[in-house]
Amino acid sequence: MRILSAEPLNAETPLAALEETLTPESEFFVRSHFGRPDRVPRKHVLEVVGAVEQPVRLNMADLEAMGTRTLAVTVECAGNGRTGFQPLPAGEPWGLGAVSTARWTGVPLRAVLESARLRPRAVEVLAIGADRGRPPDVADEIPFARSLPLAKARDPDTLLALQMNGRPILPEHGAPIRLIVPGWYGMASVKWLERLEVLSEPFRGYYQLGRYVYDYEDGNPPAPVRTIRVRSVIVSPQDGDVVRQGHVVVRGQAWSGEGVVVRVQIGVDGVEPSQDATLSPPISPHAWRAWEFGWDATNPGRHVLRSYATDAKGNRPPDVGRWNRYGYGNNAVQAIAVTVQ
Ligand SMILES: Nc1nc2c(c(=O)[nH]1)N[C@H]1C(S)=C(S)[C@@H](COP(=O)(O)O)O[C@H]1N2
Ligand SMILES: [Mo]
């Protein structure tokens, strides 16, 4: 892993590990604002309070008894690709490895909300993590907390995850319970989940309005960061590699929060895509698709490769990402240089 900071732990998945459709757990990227809470909640209880008829407290067994689902979900940090922005915004300098995929098993958040019975004035569900700290520009200690609008909270694929790849969630990934919000950037998938608060007014917390907003500094009000933008990454060969003249297999992953990727095209030495890659079958509506392209590398010398994804809604990535103050959502087409000899 490439460690960006040790305390709190922020580490990115090496590009080579992105080749696996299910990311090896020891290489699943880690993004934490405050470091993980030290309390090891063996007898963890999740509280559901606020605008509900029936506040509930659920332990792990209670949750498991509500019925679980398993979904493969690609989690991508909104800051993935930040280093491609110029000037470089503040924040963790992520390359392209702040993205990983796991099979998550959990209870649909919806089932828990139904058991607590929402009051008619409910508008959002606030998820509060057990980790706390003081961001540089904030006066008091705060928990990591983020809200979801009711529609997303009630999406049957939004999970209170209890397992990652069939085993208890690893400590750095949010044990014992975390949210998994498919299709949205990682900040929505609150780790070390301690409390759900049903709100009758939109949440105005730091990680809702102060961060995770697209601020284009163009005079318009910042917009919330939500859906993962379509992207394709070449994982093999890597930038700067030297390959043997002849047939070269180019591999990558492509994903989007708007729907599965339906096409990946490759561009060689030009900014226009020219040929199609072969996509592997989707393992889930919310996971990336591995792709492969047989490149006829007949001409020696330096060549530039690009990959272009198209998702089910027809979205395609831009050549240049739209710069914003905190450096989110940079899904610009990646270019790698490879020498054929
Ligand atoms: N409690 C808590 N949840 C959190 C965070 C955090 O710092 N604290 N970071 C968020 C962000 S920004 C991302 S990208 C994902 C990363 O999940 P991972 O570390 O399991 O890859 O967790 C999210 N959930
Ligand atoms: Mo993130």
Image (cartoon, grey):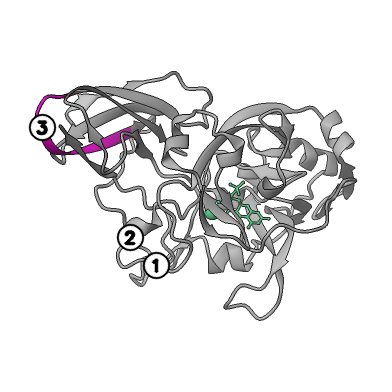
The location of residue 172, given as percent across then percent down, is 67, 49
Question: What residue is shown with label 1?
Answer: 89
- Mark 2 vs mark 3, foreground winner is 3
The reply to whether discs 1 and 2 touch (Cβ–Cβ < 8 Å) is yes
> What SS does tag 1 mark?
loop
Which corner quadrant of the figure contains ligand 2? Answer: bottom right
Question: Looking at the rendering, which quadrant does residue 200 occupy?
Answer: bottom right
N-terminal label among 2 and 3: 2
Q: CA distance from mark 2 to mark 3?
A: 31 Å
Mark 2 residue's CB less than 8 Å from ligand 2: no
N-terminal label among 3 and 1: 1
Residue 304 is a magenta residue: yes
Give the residue furthest to the bottom: 139
Residue beneath the point at 41% across and 61% down: 327
> What SS does tag 2 mark?
loop
- Label the magenta part by its dominant secondary structure: strand
Q: Amino acid at mark 1?
A: Pro
Residue beneath the point at 33% across and 60% down: 85
Q: In the image, which disc is placed on residue 322?
A: none
The reply to whether discs 2 and 3 touch (Cβ–Cβ < 8 Å) is no
Question: What residue is shown with label 3?
Answer: 300
Note whether residue 7 is visible. Answer: yes
Residue beneath the point at 44% across and 31% down: 19
Which one is nearer the viewer's eye here, 319 or 201? 319
The location of residue 271, given as percent across then percent down, is 16, 41
- Whether residue 58 sits left or right of residue 218 in the image: it is right
> What stretch of residues is rendered in magenta?
297-309
